[in-house]
Image: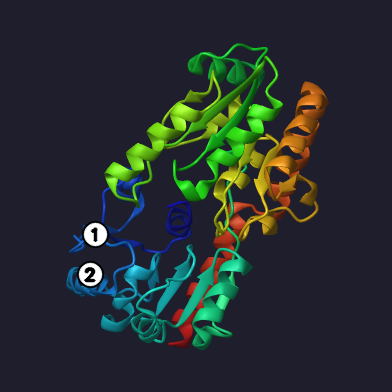
Amino acid sequence: MEVTERLSRRGHAVHLVYRNDGAFLNQYQGFCASVSRIAYPGGARLEPFSAAAAAVMASVRARSLRSGISYLNALTDLPVAMIRSAPAVLHLREPPPRRYLRIWASLLRRVAGCIAVSQTVADSFVNRFPMLEGRVVVVHSGVDPDHYRPATEHERSAARSALGFESEEVVLLYAGRLSPDKGIPVLLRAVEQTQPARLRLVVAGGPDSFRPKLASHRYASWLRSVAPPGTAFVGARSDNVSLFHAADMVVLPSTWDEPFSRVVLEAMACGVPVLASRKGGTPEAYEGLEHYLFDDVPQLTRLIDQLLTMGDERRRDLGARMRGHVAERFPLERAVDRIEQVLATTASQH
């Protein structure tokens, strides 16, 4: 949403065609020139047949638009590239599909170009779909450092009070889906081995909406049953800023190949030290900060111990260093500049 909102501010007319209402619909309605909802038949996340049917409906809804380009945010939007006459650019935010490869390949041939959130994602798509060689531009995600900023003492105290934490506690935060591929058990085992009396583990997130409902809720319940005593499960949040303001450190323990984690950038921008697993595109956010990546439970345990023994002042210094790193390398406006350039160049060439 942040990218399209910035593009709208720059004078581009954004016409949104979407599937689910989601938490940000009101914001989209505030800046989009038009907003249209379609319903996908079926529920498969990467099901090309359902996507094709939905794309027909999307194109019927959008046929009156005179848009210069179709900006596609998911693989399931690809049939739009086949039906609409405007050139299409696909933003690659997830790993490539493993099924229906011939169908996806035929659809990918129709796009004018792709934007990938990391070099890791770009390479994985090119390896699976060689016809994309030379057609993928890497634009790392960016964050707004004015929105994601360090807490004042008052904000920190208020954020902790709202969660029921004491000021003396050292708060270690996980923020993300409660899903097996997020590696939360890795974090739980590390905390069990490092837990001093004043360490409070906070897990913020809800059941994985991409998995069957019963299985995802069972997994979330299992996590609660095996978590160390005192672990706080605070549910999903639409904006994690207040959580980052309450935290002393953040851990991303993913066991899958994260495309490029926004949580890492957001927490760093808030001045909070972030430890992350060396998976997928995440290391691309840690150039010069590789010491704070880990491969297994023992390494994570040692890193948590290091942050605990630093004390408050040195942790704040490290958080300030990480914020400077994000502000310099991953500002939102730079990402929008590059995406705007790709879209404008593609539109002018077709």
User: With 244 as the anchor, is 286 left or right in this view?
Assistant: right
Mark count? 2
Q: Is residue 150 visible?
A: no
Q: Is residue 72 left or right of residue 231?
A: left
Task: Say few, some or many: other residues with alpha carbon within 10 Å of mark 1 (under 14 / 14 to 19 / 20 or more).
Answer: few
Sequence-wise, the earlier of marks 2 and 1 is 1
Residue 147 placement, left or right of 307: left
Mark 1 residue element? loop
Q: Residue 84: x and y, percent?
A: 28, 80
Residue type for callout 2: Ser
Local packing at callout 2 (Cα closer than 10 Å; few below 14, some 14-19, many 20+) is: some
Residue shown at the point (28%, 75%) measured from the top left = 66
Residue hosting label 2: 50
Task: Please tell me whether residue 95 is drawn above or below residue 156 in the rendered image.
Answer: below
The reply to whether callout 2 and callout 1 are in contact (CB within 8 Å) is yes
Quarter the C terminus occupies: bottom left
Residue 125 position, x and y percent, is 52, 75
Q: Is residue 18 above or below residue 185?
A: below
The picture places residue 192, in percent across and down from the top left corner, at 64, 28
Residue identified by numbered label 1: 43
As displayed, is residue 164 above or below residue 92?
above
Seen in the picture, residue 67 relative to 9 is either above or below; the reply is below
**Residue 177 in view in this figure:** yes
In this image, 302 relative to 239: left or right? right
Depth check: give the residue in front, 9 or 145: 145
The quarter of the picture where residue 52 lies is: bottom left
